[in-house]
Image: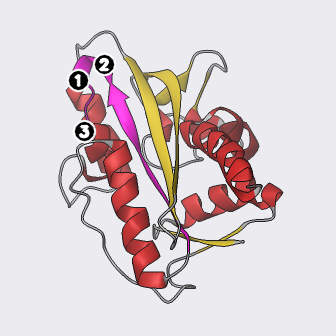
Amino acid sequence: MKLVLASKNAKKLVEMNTILSQLGIEVCSEAEAGVDIDVEETGTTFEENSLLKAQAVMQASGMPAIADDSGLCVDALQGAPGVYSARYGGEGLDDVGRYRLLLENMEGQSPRTAKFVSVITCCFPNGDVISARGECPGTITYAPFGEGGFGYDPVFFLPGLKKTMAQLTPEEKNAVSHRGQALEAFKVKLEEYLSK
């Protein structure tokens, strides 16, 4: 089976393929499916935005589409940046700019507890929808550490591993990350769906 990833993020494509290839599923990019659309993420939850993206790309490609909506929820910031994680601080900021802004906003704040959340949704042309959620708890560091990952990974510390997400190998990250957990849960639901 082939799914189209409703994202232009090449690193997400690699993560999805690593986990879903175990089921014999290939995840291709929008470009490979001949699709180039920007979906407006108007939802107020990860579930809503994930569904919006998967539906739009499924309709545009005519193929089953898989979308991930994920973000960082910080307790001291009342759950911010949340669904706005990729747009935190406005259009002009890159990953480094966004996590620097987060660290500035966290000055003097406690607790520093946070969680990464990921919701994976797959929409099929026949109208069926499969969805799964994963969460990864941690804390926000005072400075960035590590070269790996992307987004807020350098400032997200995993107390159990005594490393930031950016200090993990891709295998370690997939084993504990919110997206890894959501994909594992999704994989189980997809196996059940395909065996019907």
Q: Which mark is residue 75?
A: 2
Q: Which residues are magenta?
A: 64-81
The residue under label 2 is which amino acid type?
Answer: Asp
Camera-near label (1 vs 3) is 1
Earlier sequence position, callout 1 versus callout 3:
1
> Quick one: 115 or 165, which is closer to the camera?
115
- The residue positioned 65% from the left and 32% from the top of the image is 176
Graded by Cα atoms within 10 Å as few (under 14), some (14 to 19) or many (20 or more), the crowding at tag 3 reads some
Q: CA distance from mark 1 to mark 3?
A: 12 Å
Say whether marks 1 and 2 touch (CB < 8 Å). Answer: yes
Q: Residue at x 56, y 58 (%)?
A: 12
Which residue is tagged 3?
A: 101
- The answer to which of 135 and 150 lies nearer the viewer is 135
Depth-wise, is mark 3 or mark 2 nearer the camera? 2
Q: How far is disc 3 from disc 2 in space, using C-alphas?
A: 16 Å
In this picture, is 1 found above or below 162? Answer: below
Q: Position of residue 123 (x, y in %)?
A: 49, 63
